[in-house]
Amino acid sequence: MSKYRQEIKMGINEFDKRVLASRLSCIMQRDKHGEEDGSYKVRSLYFDDLSDTAFHNKLMGVKYREKFRIRTYGDSSLIRLEKKVKDNQLGYKETARLTRDECERLLEGEYHFLRERSERVCRQLYIKLRTGLFLPKTIVEYDREAYIWEPGRIRITFDSNVRTGLGSVDFFNTSLPLVPAGYGNTVILEIKYDEYLPRHISQLLQLDSRHKSAISKYVLCRCYD
């Protein structure tokens, strides 16, 4: 069973991001996915049902929510199927690695191979897809800069330049036109940890002076569909 983790999310500006990243780089390791400048591209394809339940649950502030997505990191061949669960301020993620062929078959509606996979997230998505009411909805892409501190499995990310494929599900099309989503130069700061956030890190982030937010990149992009 996956373990719930604490998750804090807030919107900051580009200047704040540069200041915080400079501080964090002194005590935390950069994510291995990052390029020379420390950032990398994340592209996700989100699923939802015909009633857009995941979308509306987020808008209404439903405490327990779940989302299914396919995700790639940078130019890596790594493709993951993920189920993201949120319960108030706690969250966890279940994952399974997919091959390019499996992913393409899934997007073409040939999803029965999921039934044979051992990972629970694969079987759960199979059950949802077989009803015919659960479909891929939209592509979400953004630039990420991430920092890691192994004790407490602390992970801090800065997500910027959020863009949407306007309802397209052509996941592997690198020439797909994307348009900006969100509010100008807003950067989404996310902080994830297990039991506690050490004081020396929270002080660097100045959390007491910042306001938590319920920003959702999926919701931002769906508003443009």
Image: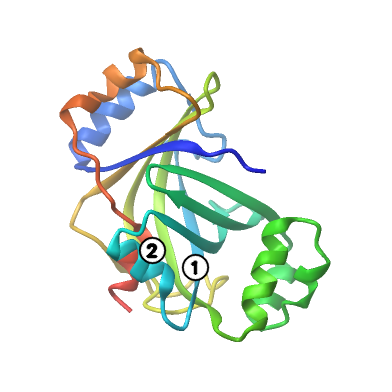
Q: Quadrant of residue 183?
A: bottom left
Colour setting: rainbow
Q: Quadrant of residue 150?
A: top right
Q: Marks 2 and 1, how far apart in space? A: 7 Å
- Tell me residue 130's x, y (percent): 67, 81
Q: Residue at x 24, y 61 (%)?
A: 182
Relative placement, left or right, of 189 versus 5 is left
Q: Residue at x 54, y 63 (%)?
A: 69
**Nearer to us in this view, 60 or 212:** 60
What amino acid is labelled 2 in the image? Answer: Tyr
- Tell me residue 189's x, y (percent): 32, 40
In this picture, is 142 found above or below 123?
above
Q: Residue at x 48, y 25 (%)?
A: 195
- Label 2 CA crowd tier, 10 Å (few <14, some 14–19, many 20+): many
- Tell me residue 220's x, y (percent): 30, 64
**Nearer to us in this view, 178 or 109:** 109
Find disc 1 in the rendering and name its residue.
46
Label 2 element class:
helix
Q: Residue at x 68, y 73 (%)?
A: 127
Residue 147 badge: none
In this picture, is 219 found above or below 135?
above
Q: Quadrant of residue 20?
A: top left
The N terminus sits in image quarter: top right
Whether the residues at callouts 2 and 1 have beta carbons within 8 Å, the answer is: yes
Mark 2 vs 1, N-terminal side = 1
Find disc 2 in the rendering and name its residue.
218
What amino acid is labelled 1 in the image? Answer: Tyr
Label 1 element class:
strand
Q: For the view shown, which residue lies furthest in the top direction?
A: 200
In this picture, is 208 found above or below 186?
above
Relative placement, left or right, of 116 versus 28 is right
